């Protein structure tokens, strides 16, 4: 699934930063041609990057609708709200039918995984 990532050449791009607010996770990337890209995960419910050391070069990027990490995030929310999941205060998080997982794999095999309702790309 490509969606909002059409036209972006991921191999050899560089990860610049990952920032989180209450509602969004934003990832700043510089592609191999020097173009600045900002990917924003709107209404996220989880993200992880395990084993990060010193690699920032991107190997690949995928966007999927099914993944064990999506299930893990949804299960954790359900477990914490046994009387039903209340509104979160995030419109994107509260409304929608499915979750997406963006997997950004770095050259050393470490992956940044973000689960959200929607991903938006801004080329700066």
Image (cartoon, grey):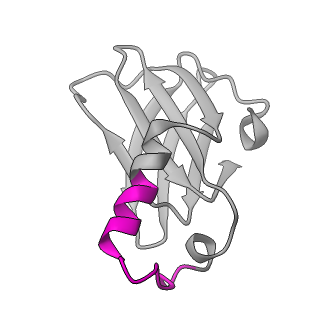
Q: Quadrant of residue 33?
A: top right
Position in image of residue 91 (x %, y %): 61, 80
Magenta range is 73-90
Q: Going by the picture, which residue comes out furthest to the front?
A: 83
Position in image of residue 85 (x %, y %): 46, 78
Residue 30 is one of the magenta-drawn residues:
no
Q: In this picture, is 118 found above or below 65?
A: below
For the point 50% across and 61% down, the residue is 44
Residue 88 is one of the magenta-drawn residues:
yes
Between residues 39 and 68, which one lies in front from this camera angle? 68
Position in image of residue 20 (x %, y %): 39, 61
Image quadrant containing the N terminus: top right
122 vs 55, left or right, is right
Between residues 88 and 15, which one lies in front from this camera angle? 88
Say if residue 119 shows up in the picture: yes
For the point 22% across and 28% down, the residue is 51
């Amino acid at each position: 699934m490509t969606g909002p990532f059409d036209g972006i050449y991921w191999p050899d791009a560089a990860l610049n930063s990952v920032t989180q607010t209450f509602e969004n996770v934003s990832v700043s990337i510089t592609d191999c041609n020097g173009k600045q890209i900002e990917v924003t995960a709107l209404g996220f419910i989880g993200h992880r990057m395990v084993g990060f050391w010193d690699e920032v070069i991107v190997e690949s990027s995928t966007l999927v609708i099914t993944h064990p990490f999506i299930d893990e995030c949804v299960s954790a929310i359900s477990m914490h709200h046994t009387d039903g999941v209340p509104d979160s205060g995030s419109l994107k998080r509260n409304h929608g039918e499915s979750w997406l997982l963006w997997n950004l794999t770095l050259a050393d095999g470490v992956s940044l995984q973000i689960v959200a309702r929607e991903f938006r790309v801004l080329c700066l």
